[in-house]
Amino acid sequence: MKKISICSIFFLLISILFFHGDVLASASKKRSDSWPKVLTIASTPVQTTGYVVASALGKRIEEKLGIPVTVTVSIGNAAIRLVVKGSAELCQPNEFNFYHAVRGIGKLKQHGKAPLRYLTFTYPLYVAAMSREKITSFSDLKGKKCMFDYPAVPHYMMVTDALLDFHGMKKDDLVILKSMRGGDVSDALIARTADAGMRMSPPRGQPWLKELDRKMAVNFLPLSDEEINYVIKKHPFFFAGSLSAGTTKGQDQPIKTLGIGQNLVVHKDLPEDLVYEIAGILMDSCGKTTPGDFTKYRPSAAWTLQDNMDALTRKVGPFHPGVVKYLKDRGVWTSEHDRIQAEMEALNK
């Protein structure tokens, strides 16, 4: 058996130390003393696309950045408050909640302007206005029992009020019913205690919609371009979109309607270099108009770089400087985006 010389052992140990030193040096370049020791993401409920994205993001942050991540369920304004008071670093409000929070209006008015910044668009939800019978226009709902008032989702009534105004109608022209949970709409349509209802859905539907379609013939109420543009002018956090063909039985054409973005936002004081790294984890695999690999966790998580630029153009709220730097490095940020960003930051002071 050949003896190993002391010199050989010495050089072997030196090479191992240099190798591991390079790895540790590389990792230390990403870590910073200013970064939180732990991150918390306030997510939408379990089984939603938002929760899947939050869980996958948390795992990647732990793997790539070495920061433990906790995912907790808290939605809407409650999630925003967690970030504002420092109990979470990221949350997932839709653009309605984010729009109102950074301006300090609506239900968050008493708390003032929330110190939040945009991280990324994650997926769209679309207004699914449905009826029991074939109705081709919103004005055909006159005299019908419509379950459009859901206090937990106030933008349903915003859409309703704008469409009533567009058609020159009054609230009394509809029999507006209130729901206390999303499932009330499906139950009321099946039981015939409501003629129409409103819920939100990804473009290809959700389990609740598939179940409703199994129990009754779902008739979607499409919106015209004029109706959509009228609502958007009043409420710019909406955008034009459609429910995909084949979402329900016999629906062979897309249904034009209004969309609203679901987002990840962060506290404005989260370190810029950390947010830059998180933006990369979320968007490195995205193209300008092609979705990244988060779709492998949930197909509806199909955001693109352009989705983020469109959100800024809608003037929903300001982006975090770390995201601005990332998008500039990706070549999609322009001088016009700088102008809008400055406008959004000014309104949040």
Image (cartoon, helix red, strand yellow):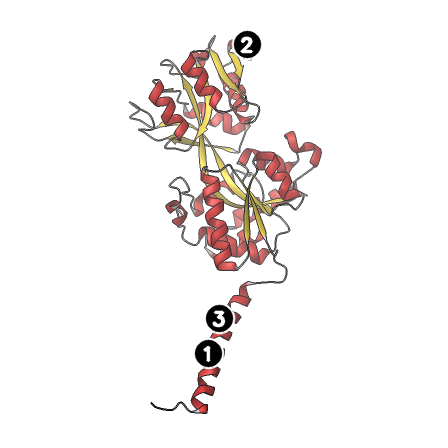
Residue hosting label 2:
172
- Residue at screen point 53% across, 21% down: 162
Q: Is residue 298 left or right of residue 158?
A: left
Q: Secondary structure at mark 1?
A: helix
Q: Look at label 1 and name its amino acid.
A: Ile
Observer-side mark, 1 or 3, equals 1
Q: Position of residue 127 (x, y in %)?
A: 45, 27
Q: Look at label 2 and name its amino acid.
A: Asp
Q: Position of residue 332 (x, y in %)?
A: 46, 51
Quadrant containing the C terminus is top right
The dot on residue 23 is 3
Q: Secondary structure at mark 3?
A: helix
- Kindly check if marks 1 and 3 are in contact, taking CB atoms under 8 A apart as contact: no
Residue hosting label 1:
16
Q: CA distance from mark 2 to mark 3?
A: 69 Å
- Residue at screen point 56% across, 56% down: 274
Q: Position of residue 131 (x, y in %)?
A: 41, 16
Q: CA distance from mark 1 to mark 3?
A: 11 Å
Q: Position of residue 80 (x, y in %)?
A: 61, 39
